[in-house]
Amino acid sequence: MQSIVSSHHLCLPPPVLNHSLICHRVPSIRLPSHRSTSTTSLRLFNCAASRESEIMAPAGKEDGQDPRIPKIASSIRVIPDFPKPGIMFQDITTLLLDTEAFRDTIDIFVERYKGKDISVVAGVEARGFIFGPPIALAIGAKFVPMRKPKKLPGEVISVEYSLEYGTDTMEMHVGAVEPGERAIVIDDLIATGGTLAAAIRLLERVGVEIVECACVIELPELKGREKLGEAPLFILVTSDAA
């Protein structure tokens, strides 16, 4: 069993449930035909996914299902065979066009992390740059971009990680974070988990505590959460598309 994240910085009650996956399902939702070119369904979750987290679910959701999540799920479009055949692309641009769904997405994350002594919101290039900054501003944290090689102008620290074919590199500015700071890592989607795992390693190398990773969408069939080690994962929507 994976070890539970320490909560010595927070005065929170212990999790109510004692198993490793705390979530509540509702039936699959078919994406409306005018919003999607695919019949792929999205399942709704409001959970601290891969391990018990020190952060409790937002208050007022007694059954664990946030009523805003169905709206968020229905606003995400799935594009088949993009960017190449066999790929079911999760298009969050339609979520961004829906001001209510976009605001609700940000609000759910803010409600979860506000007041939890988090000083760093690390956003993974590129769509983590969309969700990360408004969350950081709302909870009073700094936003730290985690970028591809040769995109940051100053001195950087980097980590190499494996792809299905070959490797890639993630970089962060030297001095952007300090040892002992508490961070969340934000991206729009977790698939194979390689980029999130690289971000975790990069931050932990300089002594940052990873409180949680957070994504809007998860592709569970690709088992990306297994690469995150002891870092908890919070997701809103899971997709059958992989």
Image: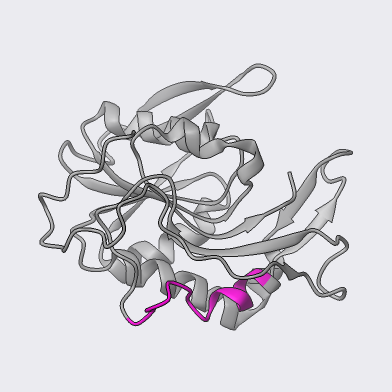
Q: Quadrant of the C terminus?
A: top right
Query: Which residue occupies the foreground of this view, 55 or 129?
Result: 55
Vertical position of residue 214 compared to residue 201: above or below: below
Nearer-the-camera pick, 135 or 143: 135
Q: Is residue 28 above or below residue 87?
A: below
- Judge whether residue 69 is colored magenta: yes
What x and y, as percent, mark residue 142? 29, 55
Say if residue 1 shows up in the picture: yes
Q: Residue at x 79, y 48 (%)?
A: 88
Count of labels in the image: 0
Closest to the observer: 223 or 88?
223
Q: Hey, which quadrant is residue 173 in on the image?
A: top left
Q: Is residue 154 visible?
A: no
Q: Residue at x 47, y 76 (%)?
A: 66
Q: Which residues are magenta?
A: 60-73
Task: Kindly identify the residue that appears in the image at 42 percent across and 61 percent down.
Answer: 133
Q: Quadrant of residue 154 in the image?
A: top left
Is 88 on the left-hand or right-hand side of 54? right
* Left or right position of 162 against 234: right
Outermost residue, top side: 166
Q: Is residue 231 magenta?
A: no
Q: Position of residue 101 (x, y in %)?
A: 59, 77
Question: Does 35 appear above or below 144?
Answer: below
Image coordinates for residue 122, horizontal then vertical, percent = 38, 47
